[in-house]
Amino acid sequence: MEPLELKKKEFLLKEGEVCRCNYFVESGCLRMFYNNDKMVEQTTQFALETWWLSDYFSFSKQQPSEYFIQAVENSIVLAIDFQRQEQLFAEVPQMERYFRIMMQRALAASQLRVKLIYQLSKEEMYKHFSTSFPQFLQRVPQYMLASYLGLTPEYLSELRKKI
């Protein structure tokens, strides 16, 4: 694994590039986002310490990505490229099991997020997020958090004042 030091707002991946690595956050915070039809950033994921982040479609297929991965704050990540990860899985079966379990948890979290988007009001979604992940509230800029929750920054500000 290769350690990478990132400055705030530095990119690991840009749309159109092939995602060559899977990233483990040693310190700091990353986000994954895309530009929607109105060219507004839409955040889809965050990753804090001990979390993995990658565009798994691009990474596994070695095809161009539709996403950006950017440091939210100064960060240190460990990067493992596709070939080395495959070699690691072949040589150390326990690592393949570890990644399978990690991916199952990530998929379960993604499925829950989709359910909550349909089930909860915007206010309930914010309350759920702030209760479940309080560490993000002080570390992630409000406009990024609003994007992730499907809110405008102004409405998020109103919700914070109300709550």
Image (tube, grey):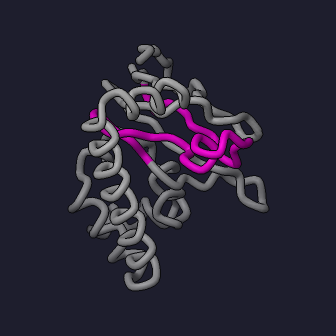
Which of the pair 125/58 is nearer the observer? Answer: 58
Q: Quadrant of residue 50?
A: top left
Q: Is residue 31 left or right of residue 51?
A: right
Q: Is residue 61 left or right of residue 81?
A: right
Specify whether 19 is left or right of 145: right
Quarter of the figure with the N terminus: top left
Extreme-bottom residue of the structure: 119
Residue 14 percent coordinates (x, y): 69, 35
The picture places residue 29, in percent across and down from the top left corner, at 39, 34
Q: From the image, which quarter does the C terminus lie in?
A: bottom left
Considering only vertical position in the picture, is 88 above or below 127? above
84 sits left or right of 127 in the view: right
Magenta part of the protein: which range?
Answer: 46-73
The answer to whether residue 157 is above or below residue 27 is below
Q: Is residue 151 above or below residue 136?
A: below
102, 4: nearer the viewer? 102
Q: Is residue 112 above or below residue 91?
A: below
Q: Residue at x 34, y 65 (%)?
A: 108
Q: Is residue 90 magenta?
A: no
